[in-house]
Image (tube, helix red, strand yellow):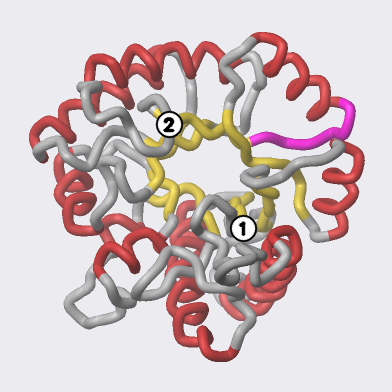
């Protein structure tokens, strides 16, 4: 089994040749980015991906943006999702990563909506995963576990940093059994959260070593699952970002770290982490030739 690492385009601005050179230097194979809804934007993205021979994971919001409009109900979200799938199809993504729903809906409504969203994806032949994210249906690990029990067919993108800040602690208590969720994770977004926020200032900082170690244990659990299931490839996207996630100095609002260098560090570190893990685990697993 191999690890394919993607570069998030969240917060990126610049030229595609430079972007491709940077991500290749960091060992990435492609990009994870929003689907443009305008035809010229989709054409420009498709041409850039093809010119640089980059793979693509599409990001889609079922709402109007990361924070959904509170007046929009499930029907509006499903209509938006249908249009998003049409737009994504033109870009031939490896799969679509969905930020779905609204945290304010009651559980029964969440379950009905997510089941219909999966049915819509199936009907158009679109592989998709549902991302754990604040403000979405999957804002809480405990709500998500209820959804997992009722919709076992769903697959997920694990961004555990959101749950760390929602619960205001690392989820490492013996009572924090997330295995039913882990068993359905397809993709990892590698950002390190802490009790008071979804993004540490820098994941290499020694004061955040416990947080990094916790997130890495979760990612290892996903890799172990994928190995058992016979995946030939598992995917991971370092996803440190701006927009209130990056810590800023007061008054000057200067970022405390360079965004690409943080994501580059995470890409290189998780490559090393995976190689250490694979050396021990893949060699110990029978009948893994060719995975």
Q: Residue at x 82, y 27 (%)?
A: 48
What range is drawn magenta here? 51-56
Q: Residue at x 67, y 34 (%)?
A: 56
Q: Is residue 153 above or below residue 216?
A: above
Disc 2 marks which residue?
Answer: 65
* Relative image position of residue 36 (x, y in whole percent): 61, 21
Relative side of 126 to 31, left or right: left
Rendering quarter of residue 122: top left
Q: Secondary structure at mark 2?
A: loop
* Relative image position of residue 219 (x, y in whole percent): 49, 66
Callout 1: 10 Å neighbours few (<14), some, many (20+)?
Answer: many
Q: How many marks?
A: 2
Compare marks 1 and 2 and give the one earlier in the sequence: 2
User: Which residue is nearer to you in this view: 54 or 195?
Assistant: 195
Which mark is drawn over residue 238? 1
User: Which residue is nearer to you in this view: 124 or 50?
Assistant: 50
User: Which residue is nearer to you in this view: 232 or 236?
Assistant: 236
């Amino acid at each position: 089994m191999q690890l394919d690492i993607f570069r998030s385009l969240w917060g990126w601005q610049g030229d595609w040749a430079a972007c491709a050179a940077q991500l290749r230097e960091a060992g990435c194979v492609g990009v994870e980015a929003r689907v443009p809804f305008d035809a010229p934007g989709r054409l420009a993205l498709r041409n850039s991906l093809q010119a640089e021979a980059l793979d693509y994971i599409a990001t889609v919001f079922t709402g109007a943006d990361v924070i959904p409009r509170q007046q929009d109900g499930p029907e509006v979200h499903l209509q938006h999702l249908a249009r998003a799938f049409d737009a994504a199809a033109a870009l031939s993504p490896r799969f679509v990563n969905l930020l779905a729903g609204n945290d304010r809906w009651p559980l029964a409504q969440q379950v009905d909506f997510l089941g219909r969203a999966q049915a819509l994806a199936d009907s158009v032949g679109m592989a998709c995963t549902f991302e754990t994210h604040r403000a979405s249906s999957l804002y809480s690990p405990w709500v998500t576990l209820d959804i997992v029990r009722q919709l076992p067919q769903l697959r997920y993108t694990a961004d555990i940093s959101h749950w760390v800040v929602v619960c205001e602690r690392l989820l490492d208590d013996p009572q924090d059994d997330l295995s039913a969720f882990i068993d359905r994770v397809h993709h990892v977004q590698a950002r390190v959260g802490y009790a008071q926020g979804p993004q540490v200032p820098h994941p290499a900082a020694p004061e955040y070593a416990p947080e990094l170690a916790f997130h890495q244990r979760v990612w290892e659990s996903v890799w172990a699952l994928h190995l058992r299931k016979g995946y030939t490839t598992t995917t991971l996207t370092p996803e440190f970002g701006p927009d209130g996630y990056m810590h800023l100095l007061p008054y000057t609002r200067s970022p405390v770290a360079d965004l690409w260098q943080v994501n580059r560090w995470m890409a290189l570190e998780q490559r090393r982490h995976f190689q250490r893990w694979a050396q021990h685990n893949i060699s110990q697993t029978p009948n893994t030739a060719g995975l």
